[in-house]
Image: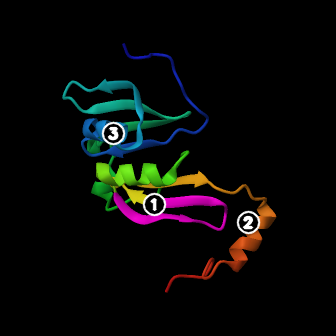
Amino acid sequence: MTDTTRQTTTLTPHISCRKAAEAVEFYQKAFGAELTSVLNTPDGRVMHAALKFGSSTLYLVDEFPEHGGQSPQSLGGSPVTLHLHVADCDAVFAHAVESGCTAAMPPADMFWGDRWGMLTDPYGHQWSVATTIREMSPEEMRKAMEEAPGCGEQIK
């Protein structure tokens, strides 16, 4: 039975996907998300789905162009990145790629203390996946950023 208890956080991403029902299954497979609710329109489109990723919720809908709702595939990309903090960045990243994501930047140790990588899912959404490998103060991060080659420089 579907849990009907509202589970919201102060800020919950709400994304549009072409073939949202397929995307729900993909996010369950690739990232271990748990489907907590789904509501379909009479024509079968997903009007609302809620997925749990650990302690966070992601809302998902089909494209509804008649109401201005478009996916990254229709828009030609998305400026938004969904960030997933996990216990093992490398394992989650590898599993996501095996499941159908495209690796944009393989996991690497970053100056801010995370092991971090970037993916694009089959629906055009960008994801970053990270594991904290070293706790750092803001001052330590600033110093590490200044010492990182090319960090903060404009790309030509």
Mark 3 secondary-structure assignment: helix
User: Which residue was labeled with disc 2?
Assistant: 141
**In the image, residue 29 lies at what x, y percent?**
33, 39
Question: Residue at the left extreme?
Answer: 43
- 9 to the left or right of 127: right
Highlighted range, magenta: 102-117
Task: Give the mark nearest the N terminus, 2 or 1.
Answer: 1
From mark 3 to mark 1, how far is it between C-alphas? 18 Å
Residue 32 inside the magenta-drawn segment = no
Q: Quadrant of residue 144?
A: bottom right
Task: Give the mark nearest the N terminus, 3 or 1.
Answer: 3
Q: As shown in the figure, which amino acid type bears the numbered disc 1?
A: Met
Give the class, few, some or many, for how many residues have Cα within 10 Å of label 1's Cα (few <14, many ≥20): many
**In the image, residue 60 lies at what x, y percent?**
38, 38
Question: Residue at the top extreme?
Answer: 1
**In the image, residue 125 lies at what x, y percent?**
38, 53
Mark 2 secondary-structure assignment: helix
Give the class, few, some or many, for how many residues have Cα within 10 Å of label 2's Cα (few <14, many ≥20): some
Instruction: Let me know if residue 122 appears in the view.
Output: no
User: Which residue was labeled with disc 3?
Assistant: 29
